[in-house]
Each structure stands twice: as structure tokens, then as C-alpha cells.
Image: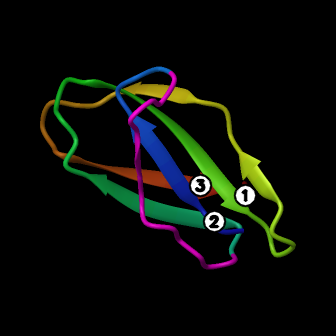
């Protein structure tokens, strides 16, 4: 499946950003989300499409971004 991550600081993801679409039809994806603000609460949702173009959107998740970096690696295994 393809993968794209929607992320932002609003719990409803209003005004959110999207990562570049990873269009590789694979069961596992990894991407780096850059330019995040340290010590900030972020919300994210992974979206994927299978070979038949069926959209699957995982529920909104939350994470507190660390203080020593400005990027995050997202790993999607089997979604």
C-alpha cells in the first residue's frame, strides 16, 4: 500500500501538513517528518491506499515531540 502522514498541532488536524506521498506498493514504509518544533504536542494520522485504490486512514494518534531534534521517523509496518 502507499503511505502518507497527515500531522499538526490541532487535535482535529485542522491546518495540518502532509508528508510527500510514498507511492511504493509495500507492506512497510518509513519516512522522516522534518521541521517539527521541539517540546510540542503533535497529532498525526497515517493514510494508505492498496493496489485497488481503497483508502485506509488510521485513527488520529498523538505524540510529544522531543527536545533534542527537529525530525521524526515514522514507521508503518503492515498497514
The reply to whether dot 3 and dot 2 touch (C-beta < 8 Å) is yes
Crowding around mark 2 (Cα neighbors within 10 Å: few <14, some 14 to 19, many 20+) is: some
Name the residue located 47 percent from the left edge and 20 percent from the top edge: 11
Q: Is residue 75 above or below residue 43?
A: below
For image coordinates 59% across by 62% down, the residue present is 3
Residue furthest toward the right?
52
The secondary structure type at the circle numbered 1 is: loop
Q: Residue tagged by mark 2?
A: 28
Q: Residue 76: give its label.
A: 3
- Extent of the magenta region: 12-25
Residue 54, placed above or below residue 25: above
Q: Are marks 3 and 1 in contact (CB under 8 Å)?
A: yes
Task: Name the secondary structure under disc 2.
Answer: strand
Q: Is residue 62 left or right of residue 2?
A: left
Labelled pair 2, 1 in contact (Cβ < 8 Å): yes
| N-term-proximal mark, 3 vs 2 | 2
The prevailing secondary structure element of the residues shown in magenta is loop
Mark 2 to mark 1: distance in Å?
A: 6 Å
* Left-right relation of 18 to 68: right
Q: Position of residue 34 (x, y in %)?
A: 25, 53
Q: Report which residue position mark 1 lands on.
A: 78
SS category of the residue bearing label 3:
strand
Amino acid at each position: 500500500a502507499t503511505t502518507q502522514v497527515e500531522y499538526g498541532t490541532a487535535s482535529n488536524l485542522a491546518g495540518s501538513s502532509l508528508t510527500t506521498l510514498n507511492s511504493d506498493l509495500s507492506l512497510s514504509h518509513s519516512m522522516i517528518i522534518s521541521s517539527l518544533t521541539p517540546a510540542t504536542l503533535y497529532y498525526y494520522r497515517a493514510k494508505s491506499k492498496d493496489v485497488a485504490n481503497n483508502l485506509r486512514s488510521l485513527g488520529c494518534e498523538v505524540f510529544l515531540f522531543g527536545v533534542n531534534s527537529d525530525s521524526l521517523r515514522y514507521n508503518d509496518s503492515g498497514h
